[in-house]
Image: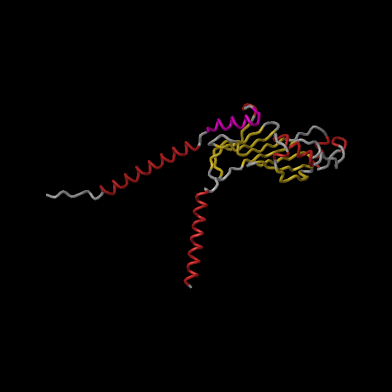
Amino acid sequence: MKKERNPFIFPALGMIVVLLIAVFVFHRFSRADDKAVGLSLEEAKHIALNDAGEQSDQVTYTKASLDQDSGIPIYEIDFYTDNNNYEYDISAQTGNIRDKDITVHQKETSTGSRQQKETGQVSTQDQGSPTEVIGVKKAQSIALAAASLKESQVTFTKSNLETEDGSLVYEIEFSRDNQKYEYDVDARTGAILSYDIDRQEKLPARSTANDRDMDDDDDADDDDSDDFEDDD
């Protein structure tokens, strides 16, 4: 007597194979992600605190998470103290600080400073003449000193005197290599109100070999075009 085959055997085997492949791919990509993120969240926090010169028990975190920026895994670490707000983007692969933004809290220490904040007017008793400012050159030198750079090492892209919340502020921006620096400097006191340092990732240059191949292809196309014209 001929034994009949179970019609469900092959579909079941097919499903098992598909599941095994899915499990393999999942674990493969999981291991790749683990290798891509070579830094733990706590290590990223330590890097940010170390750069800011703050202690962990003196700050309050508002954000500490793993994210991506143009396909690159980064830790976003945001925290504040009584005096400053800090925002850091740290590479989860290398631990390099890709971007940081530090804002200094303005304190009201006198009647004049309260008046400036509430009405946008400056008390001449506290800060001198409303038109008395430190000058753009002085603001640039303050920003350069904060960045530990010299004027010959950078390219200035912006040096403007602006009004922010009734206060005069110099917006100083410059770049060096693949880093961009932005500083807001109080136009009367010279105090740095905020700054941002943005590290731009360099894209890999196209290989010379590829360029040569493309040029050869263009030359071949030109030769073909010339041959066609000769035939005519």
**Viewer-proximal residue, 80 or 98?**
98
> What residue is shown at x 50% (from left), y 51% (from top)?
210
Quadrant hosting residue 146: top right
> What residue is shown at x 66% (from left), y 29% (from top)?
53
Horizontal side of 32 relative to 189 (left or right) equals left
Residue 124's place in the image compared with 7, above or below, is above
**Viewer-proximal residue, 185 or 135?**
135
Which residue occupies the extreme left position in the image? 1
Residue 27's place in the image compared with 218, above or below, is above
**Viewer-proximal residue, 178 or 49?**
178
Q: Is residue 167 something one can see in this rendering? A: no
Horizontal side of 10 relative to 158 (left or right) equals left
Horizontal side of 130 relative to 194 (left or right) equals right
Magenta run includes residue 92: no
Magenta run includes residue 49: yes
**Viewer-proximal residue, 177 or 183?**
177
Residue 215's place in the image compared with 168, above or below, is below
Q: Is residue 189 something one can see in this rendering? A: yes
> What residue is shown at x 41% (from left), y 40% (from top)?
28
Residue segment shown in magenta: 39-54
* x, y percent for residue 143: 73, 37
